[in-house]
Amino acid sequence: MKVKVLSLLVPALLVAGAANAAEIYNKDGNKLDLYGKIDGLHYFSDDKSVDGDQTYMRVGVKGETQINDQLTGYGQWEYKVQANNTESSSNQAWTRLAFAGLKFGDAGSFDYGRNYGVVYDVTSWTDVLPEFGGDTYGSDNFLQSRANGVATYRNSDFFGLVDGLNFALQYQGKNGSVSGEGATNNGRGWSKQNGDGFGTSLTYDIWDGISAGFAYSHSKRTDEQNSVPALGRGDNAETYTGGLKYDANNIYLASQYTQTYNATRAGSLGFANKAQNFEVVAQYQFDFGLRPSVAYLQSKGKDLERGYGDKDILKYVDVGATYYFNKNMSTYVDYKINLLDDNSFTRNAGISTDDVVALGLVYQF
């Protein structure tokens, strides 16, 4: 019976409407919303590892329950499914988010699970390109993006006293290796491991669409991270991030600068002892649905071992545009103009130096 119910439910998830999440239940203080998108996506590139079909689907559920006047429970789950391979292929679907929490009125909220690291509170401001962007950091990379086992306290409007002043505190437990002394129940490869860590963020909506933000994270590194990869040694991984954003009058401008220590991946070789990451983006929303976008992103590793010295890990200009037919349907083109030079470092680290053009047709709800 359960299998039959799921067979009916999943197709229903894929055809629900409303771009800003479809409300599927709202009664007696309990609310459940469904959201997602289906992206018919194709890459064009000389890099054969990415050239071709990239179609995927994301679906998520957000729910909340009113416990009393000052206490609300909530949860969110988000899933991604690749649709560019055979039906028998493995590792084509995974959970992006899954957490549950409580909101205590103006006193803030607390949740636990797989969620975004607090560094992303600021770096997300530049992660708005049609397809690319947001890649001077990555998921399961300490507290820089989506991460496992994070406990997060958030406070909006500073206990209801200062409009637009928001802060967060976060703790992450260890996610270790598959086997050995440093193993954990959810063990993974060295590049996605982390020791115990904490982070904090502060953002302030200053005036008339202008916002500023700062975030910091500090995590212990695992023994395997200090023994297996070729680059990057150190007991701790640290990230300092600052950002500015303007979002008003159909104009969107954002930039962020991040400095990391033993935290930015240097391709497949390991981590940069020190890295300087910079992202800037500008977009304009025309009334007839067109949203052009231009951006510049760079990640520079400093004092890399093995004689590499200072090397660009990532560097490109991005030019793209999205056209919205309506709130549910859009199409986009995104051109990643790679500025990296082909050299021994990029080859040994498995870092692509080729341009990529993305074309997508999106149904979202």
Image (tube, helix red, strand yellow):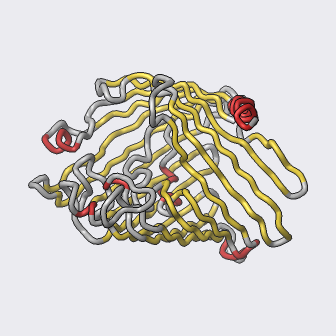
Left or right of 301: which side holds 64? right
- Please indicate, yes or no, whether residue 125 appears anywhere in the rendered image: yes
- Determine the residue positioned at 24% across, 55% down: 301
Is residue 364 or residue 15 the one in the foreground?
15
Which image quarter: residue 153? bottom right
- Please indicate, yes or no, whether residue 278 appears anywhere in the rendered image: no
- Determine the residue positioned at 67% across, 33% down: 287
Is residue 97 or residue 213 the one in the foreground?
97
Is 13 located above or below residue 177 in the figure? above
Q: Residue furthest front?
A: 1
Is 104 located above or below residue 263 in the figure? below
Is 112 located above or below residue 328 in the figure? below
Which image quarter: residue 257? bottom left
Q: Position of residue 264 (x, y in %)?
A: 32, 56
Q: Position of residue 306 (x, y in %)?
A: 10, 55
Left or right of 78: which side holds 65? right
Left or right of 289: which side holds 312? left
Which image quarter: residue 328? top right
- Determine the residue positioned at 44% across, 51% down: 139
Q: Position of residue 72 (x, y in %)?
A: 77, 65
